[in-house]
Amino acid sequence: MFHHQPKRHPCNTKLKLHYSNEYRGFAVQQRLAHGPLIENYLERGLETLQHCLSEQARTLVCRVDLRYPVGLIPSDAHISNEVMTRFFYHLSKELTWASTKYTTDIRYIWCRERNSSEAPHYHLMLLLNYDAIGGLGNYGPSDDGTYSRENLFHRVVRAWAWAIGGAAHEMSGLVHACQDKFSRQVYQCLDRRFPDSLRAAVYAMSYLCKEYSKSQELQQGFAVFTTSRV
């Protein structure tokens, strides 16, 4: 555990560092052995989740990790986050093609991280209308090794493949569905009727706010935490 606890991030003094295991009354994933959380990101993430509650009765909350395959890194990955713009463009098309009974806006929280690898990776929390899409579906590949099923997970994989220029049969392991630490499920329901559902969502979101593994990207001037507009 760090004995010295600076209040500001050395790479960007506008970023406040948070050392408590609570934020505004919500439990957060604090691992001081690796470093603090970033308060600015906690606040922005909380605002995004609260906006979901105000806009729709139920919100599907799921986290996926997006990674590049070895040797296939778009040239713009080293200078921007344009890959995420491409990803959301195609995911929007995928959800339109799904023709669900109810429509859904694509709300999200994502962070960019890199440790010792050549390429960055993204942790993405998707926030969709639960009445339109109530889960990820089967997140194993199709029988032919591609991701051709009409469920959310396969749509996410196809969007990521399109964004990075990857082949459908080479996407195994590049999109990972993350289990919630408490429920052990790969998605949650943020429900206006059940206040504690916000606590679970904030706890899951706080993982994206860790300072550890973002410093290298911050030094290079990348945006490392972004949410949909509220």
Image: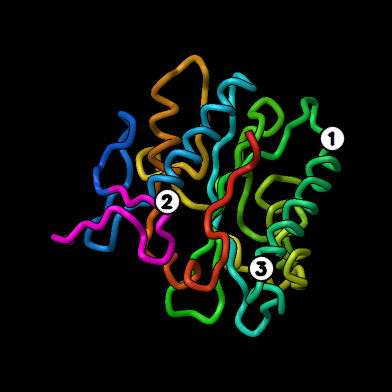
**CB atoms at circles 3 and 2 under 8 Å apart?**
no
Q: Is residue 142 left or right of residue 120?
A: right
Say which label, 3 or 2, has the lower sequence index. Answer: 3
Say which label, 3 or 1, has the lower sequence index. Answer: 3
Of tags 1 and 2, which is closer to the observer? 2
Q: Amino acid at mark 3?
A: Ser
Q: Picture quarter containing residue 61?
A: top right
Instruction: Measuring from the top left, give residue 166's x and y in whole percent.
Output: 74, 72
Residue at 66% x, 64% y is 81
Q: Which residues are magenta?
A: 1-18
Q: Which mark is residue 209?
A: 2
Q: Nearer the viewer, residue 211 or 97?
A: 211
How far is the residue under mark 3 from the one under mark 2? 20 Å
Instruction: Measuring from the top left, give residue 91's x and y in whole percent.
Output: 76, 50
Q: Nearer the viewer, residue 78 or 116?
A: 78
Query: Circle 2 sits in a helix, a strand or a loop, which is it?
Result: helix
Which residue is farthest left?
Answer: 3
Say which label, 1 or 2, has the lower sequence index. Answer: 1
How far is the residue under mark 3 from the one under mark 1? 32 Å
Q: Which mark is residue 80?
A: 3
Q: Which mark is residue 81?
A: none
Q: Which residue is mark 1?
A: 99
